[in-house]
Amino acid sequence: MLLLTVAAAMTVYLLRNILRGQIGDRIVRFLVNAFHFRSSDALTIYQLVIRNNMDMILFGIILLFLVIYSVYWFTKYFDEVSAGMDKLTEESDDEITLSPELDFMENKLNQIKNYLEKQKKAALDAEQRKNDLVVYLAHDIKTPLTSVIGYLSLLDEAQDMPPEQKAKYVGITLEKAYRLEQLINEFFEITRFNLQSIVLNKQKINLQFMLQQMADEFYPMLTPQEKQVSVNVPDGLTLWGDADKLARVFNNILKNAIAYSYENSVIDISAKQQDKNIVITFTNQGNPIPQARLETIFEKFYRLDTARSTSTGGAGLGLAIVQEIVTAHDGTISVESNPENTTFTVKLPL
């Protein structure tokens, strides 16, 4: 801007002196020679048209100069910004650099570039985890299916099989069929989780009744390892929400607590009203969750035990769906873990 001001001042000074000196004489001679005016008439025309309007002429010249200069610089800036926007989609670690005058735009473009790169990486990671999961599930489905076919073939071929042995084979076949059904349901769960939006049918819920009933339903899973569930909920504590979906939330959290708790331990389920919220906690005693994994435990297709087990391995959707449902209820879910215990906390509006 300083250079522009100096250049404008110099231009005004030079033009005023030029138009008053030899240039003025040449304009008069041009009028005489070109239009055959008398010298006095040409001089009068020069004075009336040019000399008396010197300020307006200078202003017009300077304005034209400023417009051309501004267009040049703005075009340059637009070209820089356009080039910077083109770099947003480039796979490069280089930052976008613009002229010092465009620092604000440079910072904004770099923020957008970093955000897009993180989003792209997250999408690729999620896709890779999903592909891996499909491969694992396909392999796991094949295993129980092979067993089911094998035992059914034995039962079909050996018509005179002893009743005890037949009952044993039927039991194993039924167990493998249930496992096969579970894995197929997980395939459907993946599709539903990706395509289905959550629609809530809210109603008044007796929280104590819901949690106690759920704990009783898990009795067959608790008994073999002598685990217990303790439900501590005040009488009359009610919640406004979708009963089916919240039951699924509590079911998934409790299932994880049972799977990762020590034998002969007690899993505590507590609820209380806190301001305008109801806080439900699930606390179990077990191996602590590493701090680095606490941030990703609610991600889609994430599994805490990375080495899958065909007997206990799930799709890694349980806690991700839990978070989706809780968020749909305008609530929050968090987890804390230490060597003593692990606690999942669900906070929902009263």
Image (tube, rainbow, N blue to C red):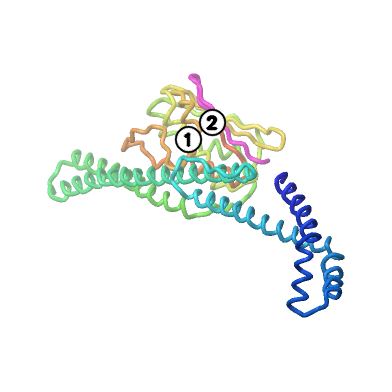
- Residue 344: in magenta span: yes
In the image: residue 87, left or right of residue 309: right
What residue sits 19% from the left and 42% below the top?
A: 166
The circle drawn on residue 335 is: 2
Crowd band around label 1 with a 10 angstrom C-alpha radius: few (<14), some (14–19), many (20+): some
**Residue shown at the point (54%, 47%) measured from the top left:** 245
What amino acid does circle 2 point to?
A: Val
* Residue 47 against residue 34 in the figure, above or below: above
- Dot 2 falls on a residue whose secondary structure is strand
Q: Nearer the viewer, residue 332 or 295?
A: 295
Q: Residues within 10 Å of mark 2 (few under 14, many from 20)?
A: some
Magenta highlight: main SS? strand
| Residue that sits furthest to the top in the current view | 340
In this view, the residue in front, 281 or 294, is 294
- Which x, y percent locates residue 349? 66, 41
Quadrant occupied by the C terminus: top right
> In this orientation, which residue lies closer to the viewer: 223 or 176?
176
Please give the residue where the numbered disc 1 appears in the rendered image.
297
Dot 1: element: loop
Q: Which residues are magenta?
A: 336-350
Q: Residue at x 17, y 49 (%)?
A: 153
N-terminal of the pair, mark 1 or mark 2, is 1
